[in-house]
Image (tube, grey):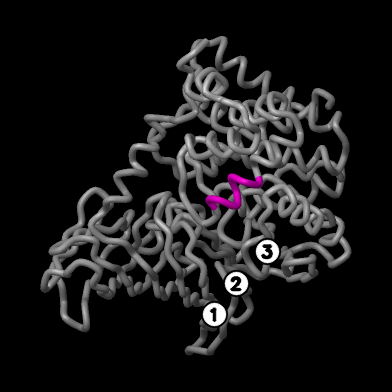
Amino acid sequence: MDIQETMKRAALLLLLSFLCIKPFATEASLQLRATSSFAVLHYDAEVDPDIANKTVKGRVLIRLISRTAELLNIELDCGELIIDSVRENREALKFAQNDHRLNISLSRPAKANETREIAVEYHGAPRRGIRFFPEQKQVYTVFATSQWMVCVDAPDDRATLNLKLSAAPNLKTIANGSLARQTRRGDKIIYEWRQQKRVPTYTFGFAVGPFHVLTETSDHAQLNYLSTRFTDDELRRIFRDAADMVNFYEARAGVPYPDTAYTQVLAAGGVEQEMSGFTVMRESYDRDVLKNERDVWLGAHELAHQWWGNMVRCFSLNEGMATFMADAYKEHRFGRAEYLREIETFRGNYEKVRDAGKDKSLVFPDWSHPTAEDRTLVYHKGAYVLYLLREELGEQSFWAGIRLYTRRYFGQSVTTPDFQAAMEQASGKNLTEFFAKWVYLTQR
């Protein structure tokens, strides 16, 4: 890898870590969420983004189940949205907003295991969580789901979703799941998307724009490519490795791609953002790949999240795992030397942070205000540690452990000890010292 390529990769990773700050939680907080007084089962949302005015309005019906004998209040995340009304069976409920949270008083207590439905209407001009590009007639979401839809916006919270998305007739939409129907309402088209598998709420999202759509098929999924400026032939060249990536990750995970379609959107702005079933990427990615067929790391990284991050969420290793898996794909596609060059870059970046005295456990206690060094640790050190673990265990045991871990916890949020246990079971080795040294920093 020459100096120019190394500098470009470093800039990409820095941009990725700053523009797409992924939801993160301590492993202690995961245990707290498990004892919440209620759980959301399903969201039925209607969202109307106004691209020209950079505003959004919507309504969401939230189906939840009580986990306590007498549930009096529920608390949801609402970002900077303005709440217009809260109702249950058309009866207005009392509510209050404070510190980006919406506290709702139920009209009567909910019993244990009782299901209730609460309807919330809202509007706002979000400053984050959703990006508007009026000149390009585009809008797309970037995590922080609660900035455009009231929800429980926690990394470990999963639910199903029906999303009715309003758009002008000349625009295309993409959202989670599959497109069930589209209907005309005045001067808008209402696109109804259905996500029938429970996925993390932070992976809810959509994109709208005047996109051209090219569709291909792989062994297990339909592949869609959306762009505003490329011909079919150019899109095929840009995404020619997409089917091979899906096949590679399926083999490494031991689990098929979890949806019926995977969509990659080339959109305005410097975005690199995975969501359930699709990814929105910066338009310059296409130029990079057309110029150099090996420059597919970003596409490989975001696709890897469909297994590791979206469906199996281990808070300490999500970004490191996707980064490592992108490198492993490049090894598969372009050879061992390509993989080792990538790993060497990450090792060097990590050692700069370590030598500056800023190394940390990968199980972060304070991710709410991450530094640049913290992001280097999550992405680069995480990938480097997985490389070291592969070297420690050998090919057969390492990949057997990855398959065991992915199959066992698919569709779940887990902690680092769960990952360690799977790798130990597959390899027959005690990895306590390895994790103490490289993950927890409790041993030098």
Q: Earlier in the sequence, mark 2 or mark 3?
A: 2
Q: Position of residue 381 (x, y in %)?
A: 60, 26
- Residue type at mark 2: give it: Thr
Q: Identify the residue at image location x=55%, y=14%.
A: 354
Residue located beneath label 3 in the image: 262
Q: Of helix, strand and loop, which one carries label 3?
A: strand
Q: Is residue 25 visible?
A: yes
Give yes or no for contact between labels 2 and 1 (Cβ–Cβ under 8 Å): yes
Q: Quadrant of residue 39?
A: bottom left
Residue position for label 2? 173
Sort mark 3 into few (<14), some (14-19) or many (20+) by Cα contacts within 10 Å.
many
Q: Which quadrant would residue 234 be assigned to in this image?
A: bottom right
Q: Amino acid at mark 3?
A: Tyr
Residue 399 on the magenta segment: no
**Residue 155, horizontal then vertical, whole percent:** 42, 49
Closer to the camera: disc 2 or disc 3?
Answer: 3
Residue matched to label 1: 191
Q: Amino acid at mark 1?
A: Tyr
Instruction: Please report the residue visible at 80 percent of the width from the left and 23 percent of the height from the top.
Output: 3
Type of secondary structure dominating the magenta stretch: helix
- Name the residue: 88% across, 36% down: 335
Magenta region includes residue 408? yes
**Which mark sits nearer the N-terminus, 2 or 1?**
2
Structural distance between the alpha carbons of marks 3 and 1: 18 Å
Q: Residues within 10 Å of mark 2 (few under 14, many from 20)?
A: many
Magenta residues, start to end: 403-409
Circle 1: element type: strand
